[in-house]
Image: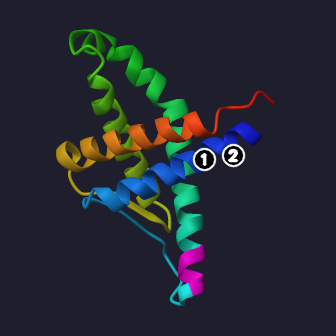
């Protein structure tokens, strides 16, 4: 359980950094007009979006990786960024069906750049906070 919570926080931080760096990625919460309420709602929104991103990565990504294996070989692994961008796009579609909004404007530029940022930030955070065996 602790490992899952760490992964959700790492995903949330990575998506937060990606929304700061890539202008085409936005996250908005449905409510909260005050300063304190807005910050609290933003944190909860990023955590929920991080959990959705983690679930999409756990369920959909292995299937996509299996079918995209030849493209991984042909591109020497660079196709992983396209797969991660697709995971961000799926997360956008799932989260827009709820009260929170994680939106990717364009797949090619925004999702690909967002995937690069999310991958880099996640990698750095996993080096700082290694997974613990429960």
Q: Quadrant of residue 58?
A: top right
Q: Is residue 98 magenta?
A: no
Residue found at the far bottom of this picture:
34
As measured in the structure, the alpha-carbon distance from the residue carrying label 1 to the one carrying label 2 is 5 Å
Stretch of the chain drawn in magenta = 36-40
Question: Mark 2 sits on what residue?
Answer: 5
Q: Quadrant of the C terminus?
A: top right
Figure coloring = rainbow
Looking at the image, is 38 positioned above or below residue 106?
Answer: below
**Residue 117's spot in the image, x, y percent?**
35, 44
Label 2 packing within 10 angstroms: few (<14), some (14-19), many (20+): few
Please state which of residues 60 and 25 is positioned toward the viewer in this rendering.
25
Please state which of residues 80 and 97 is positioned toward the viewer in this rendering.
80
Predominant SS of the magenta segment: helix
Question: Mark 1 sits on what residue?
Answer: 8
**Residue 6's spot in the image, x, y percent?**
66, 44
Residue at 52% x, 80% y: name it: 31
Residue at 27% x, 24% y: name it: 79
SS assignment at label 2:
helix
Please state which of residues 95 and 134 is positioned toward the viewer in this rendering.
134
Left or right of 77 on screen, residue 1: right
Q: Quadrant of residue 121?
A: top left
């Amino acid at each position: 359980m602790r490992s899952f919570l760490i992964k959700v926080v790492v995903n949330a931080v990575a998506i937060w950094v990606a929304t700061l760096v890539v202008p085409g990625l936005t996250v908005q919460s449905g409510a909260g007009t005050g300063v304190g309420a807005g910050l609290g709602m933003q944190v909860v929104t990023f955590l929920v979006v991080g959990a959705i991103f983690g679930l999409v990565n756990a369920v959909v990504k292995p299937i996509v990786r299996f079918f995209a294996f030849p493209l991984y070989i042909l591109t020497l692994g660079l196709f992983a960024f396209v797969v991660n961008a697709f995971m961000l796009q799926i997360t956008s579609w799932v989260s827009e069906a709820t009260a929170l909004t994680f939106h990717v404007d364009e797949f090619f530029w925004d999702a690909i750049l967002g995937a690069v940022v999310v991958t880099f930030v996640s990698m750095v955070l996993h080096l700082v906070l290694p997974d613990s065996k429960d």
